[in-house]
Image (tube, rainbow, N blue to C red):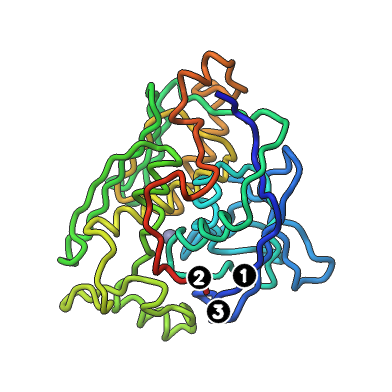
Amino acid sequence: MNNFQRTLKRSVSFSGVGVHSGNLISVEIRPAAANTGIVFQRTDLPNKPYIKANAEAVFDTSLATRIGSPQAYISTIEHLMAAFFGFGIDNAIVAVNNSEMPILDGSSAPFLVLLNEAGIEELKEFRKILIVEKTIEVVDEKNPTRFIRIEPSKKPLISYVIDFGGVAAIGRQSVTMDYTAKAFCESFSFARTFGLKEEIEFLFSRGLAKGGSMENAILVSRTEGVLNAHGLRHELEFVQHKVLDCIGDLHLMGMPLLGHVIAHKAGHDLHNKLARAILENVSARTIRVPSVREANRLKSLLTFPKSLEEVQVSLSGLAVG
Ligand SMILES: [Zn+2]
C-alpha cells in the first residue's frame, strides 16, 4: 500500500457560470509540485495573487466557503475541494478569473469528470494522515442543536443529520457512510446543492444568486415540493449534498482523516470551526506519515481512484458547462 501525494498529469480548462455573480468564469487547474497544497490564483486581479486553500484561510461561510482576504478572495470552493478529495489530489494550482468558482451542475460530479480528463500523477513524497485520538466537538452557541464532532474510530466514517421540519419535501434525513474516496465518488459526488424558493427569491431581491437556476441547484418550494422537472437524483440527495460540502470543507486540512465525523444540522461555519479545532487541538490528534504496516491496515482510508473507471458511478448525462 503506497501513500504518495498526487497532482494532475496535465492542466485542464473549463468555464461556467458563478452562482452568485451570474458571470461566465474561466478556470484552469494545473499540476503542482509535492507539498504545494491546493492553491487558488485570481488571474483577474493586479499581480494575480495566490490564495492558499487551508482551513485558516476561510473568512466567510455565509453563503459558501470563501478563502483569502476581503481584497483577494475566492468563494464556493467546496465542491471542487470535495472532488480533489475524491481523487486524493493534494497539490494543484487553480487559476480563476473571478471571485467565485463556477457552480457547474451544483455537485462535484462535473469536477470529477474534468479531473479524470486531466489524469492523476503520483508524486515521490509521502502523504501525511491525521489520526483522531480524543473527541473534538464544536457546538453552535446560538443554537445548541447544531453541532459537529469527530470521534476516534478504527475506520473513517461520516454521519450527517439535517432537519427541515417545515419543508415536507426535505424533512429529516440522516446518513452514515465510509469517509473514503470510493464511497464519496460512488454515492455522494453527484448530489446537488439546494435552496428554498422563498429564500432564493429573497437573495434575488438583494442582487445575489444571480446565476442560480434549476440547471445548478435543486429548487424546493414549501408548498409544491421539488420544482426541478427531473426531480431528485437520489431520495437522500439533500443530506448527501451536506456530506459533500462537509468533505470539501474538511479537505482544507489537506490530508485524510481517521475518525468518525458526526454532524447535526451543521453547515460551512461549523465544518470550518471543526477543521480549525482539529488543527489547534494538538493533544487530541496526531499528524504523521503512516508506516507501511499502518498504511496496509488503513487501506480504505488511503485508497484513491486513479480514474473514474475504478468506481461504480454513472456520470453520463451530467453536462459540464
Ligand atoms: Zn454545496
Residue 87 placement, left or right of 8 = left
Residue 7's quadrant in the figure? top right
Residue at label 2?
320
Q: Residue at x 23, y 47 (%)?
A: 174
Mark 3 residue's CB less than 8 Å from ligand 1: no
Residue 46 placement, left or right of 192 = right
Residue 73's quadrant in the figure? bottom right
Q: Residue at x 55, y 59 (%)?
A: 77
Which comes before the other along the chain, label 1 or label 2? 1
Up-down relation of residue 43 to residue 35 (above or below): below
Quarter of the image for the N terminus: give it: top right
> How many C-alpha atoms fall within 10 Å of the one at disc 1: few (<14), some, or many (≥20)?
some
The answer to whether the residues at label 2 and label 3 have Cβ atoms under 8 Å apart is no
Q: Amino acid at mark 2?
A: Val
Q: Secondary structure at mark 3?
A: loop
Q: Please, which residue is most extreme toward the top here?
A: 293
Which comes before the other along the chain, label 2 or label 3? 3
Up-down relation of residue 207 to residue 159 (above or below): below
Give the percent coordinates (x, y) of residue 232.
26, 66
Up-down relation of residue 66 to residue 104 (above or below): above
Q: Amino acid at mark 3?
A: Ser
Residue 68 placement, left or right of 315 = right
Q: Please, which residue is most extreme toward the front here?
A: 309
On residue 14, the disc is 1
Give the percent coordinates (x, y) of residue 216.
42, 73
Give the percent coordinates (x, y) of residue 207.
49, 84
On residue 21, the disc is 3
